[in-house]
Amino acid sequence: MLPMFNEITLKLRDTLTKKVQDGAQEIELLSWMSRTALELVGQSGLGYSFDSLTDEECAHPYSQALKGLLTLSFYWPSENLRHGRELSDYMWKLSTGIYHEKIQAFARGDDAVVQQIGRGKDIMSVLIKENMKVSDEDKLDENELIAQSALARTLLLLAQHPSVQARLREELVEARRENQGDDLGYDQLVSLPYLDSICRETLRLYPPVPRLMRTAVKDTILPLSTPVVGTDGSVITEIPVPAGADVLISIMGSNRNEALWGPDALEWKPERWLNPLPNVISEAKIPGVYSHLMTFNGGGRSCIGFKFSQLEMKVVLAHLVETFEFSPSDKRIDWHYAAVSNPYVREEGSRRVQLPIRMALAKKA
């Protein structure tokens, strides 16, 4: 999968290089991160290309449908409800169309498969070959495409922290030099300590999905990690939750808990991950699947694509940070939280998600 990730990301790098080859430019990066994330999922998961990443505007309507859907609120009724249903219907129609095209290609034989979808190494092709079926509850949906938000946030943070950006670039350049100038292999990429710490710290402080809603399917008792005192003075150690009750889970609240992460919990400090974490964090037994964080949730309903998202972040950051220097735009950026956190330009008063960042070619070491 890594060679495919590299191939797609290098297309993005080459396109952005053309935009800044004559000098620094302000680039709207969120749309490029969104298009790249969709192309990575499309090719590796479906064996389907949504975007060549060579044109200024993506011609495929799926990309625009997905971006529109993720900016809607999933929790509160709004005037966008009908629009969201139309987008969802279109995305479902296209997804099932891709699936049925693959079924027909397999029925025609291997030559037809190779002609239509390449070598059939994508996840959907593997599942079809093995005749595997998944229930509706286990299917991937649009919420798995959260990496574009994490990537955009990381690039903005690197632009705002030039010393961190420079240190990361040094690590990447040195790793490539040790690899004789070739792209890094999987083991080399995932073992880069500073790149890993930057990804972890961004996903801790700025989880792309800041909250989740879950519904209790049966009566249960919810134990509290820390007792609280009720209004009558009694000590409460657990809360009864009746069947059908909705429970709002604050992912951001857990990840920023000062009792666990210390008084600097609200600061972006990648260096905190370069040393062993305090025992209080591991002893808290946070039920997340990733680094004592709730970013990708936990249990049977955790994000099944979190390893994919981690690899995607590292591949894209490695290629872009090695090639470009990022600096903040003069425009004021606000982040709004719906299903996924997204940036907006405050001065323009627009509801269109966007993240302008100044880019220039990095100086060669």
Image: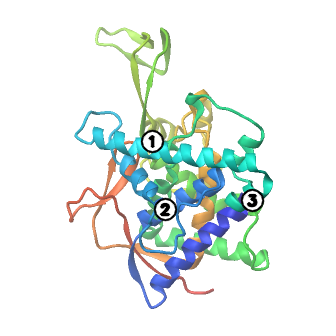
CA separation in Å, label 3 and label 1: 48 Å
Please tell me whether mark 1 or mark 2 is closer to you in this view. 2
Within 10 angstroms of label 3, few (less than 14), some, or many (20 or more) residues? Answer: few
Q: Position of residue 291 (x, y in %)?
A: 61, 42
For residue 288, side relative to residue 256 (left or right): right
Q: Position of residue 200 (x, y in %)?
A: 57, 51
Q: Which mark is residue 114?
A: 3
Please tell me whether mark 2 or mark 3 is closer to you in this view. 3
CA separation in Å, label 1 and label 2: 30 Å
Query: Can residue 271 be seen at all in this image of the molecule?
Result: no
Type of the residue with mark 2:
Arg
Residue appearing at x 56%, y 75% in the figure: 13
Residue appearing at x 62%, y 35% in the figure: 282
Type of the residue with mark 3:
Val
| Residue contact at pointers 3 and 1, CB within 8 angstroms | no
Question: In which image quadrant can residue 329 be found?
Answer: bottom left
For residue 2, side relative to residue 333 (left or right): right
Of the pair 300 and 231, the residue shown nearer to us: 300
How many numbered discs, if any? Answer: 3
Residue appearing at x 48%, y 42% in the figure: 92
Q: Which mark is residue 278?
A: none
Lower sequence index among marks 2 and 3? 2
CA separation in Å, label 2 and label 3: 25 Å
Type of the residue with mark 1:
Arg
Residue at which label 1 appears: 256
Residue at which label 2 appears: 35
| Residue contact at pointers 1 and 2, CB within 8 angstroms | no
Q: Looking at the rendering, in which quadrant would you find the C terminus?
A: bottom right
Q: Which residue is at the far front?
A: 108
Badge 1 element = loop
Query: Can residue 248 be seen at all in this image of the molecule?
Result: yes
Residue appearing at x 43%, y 53% in the figure: 267
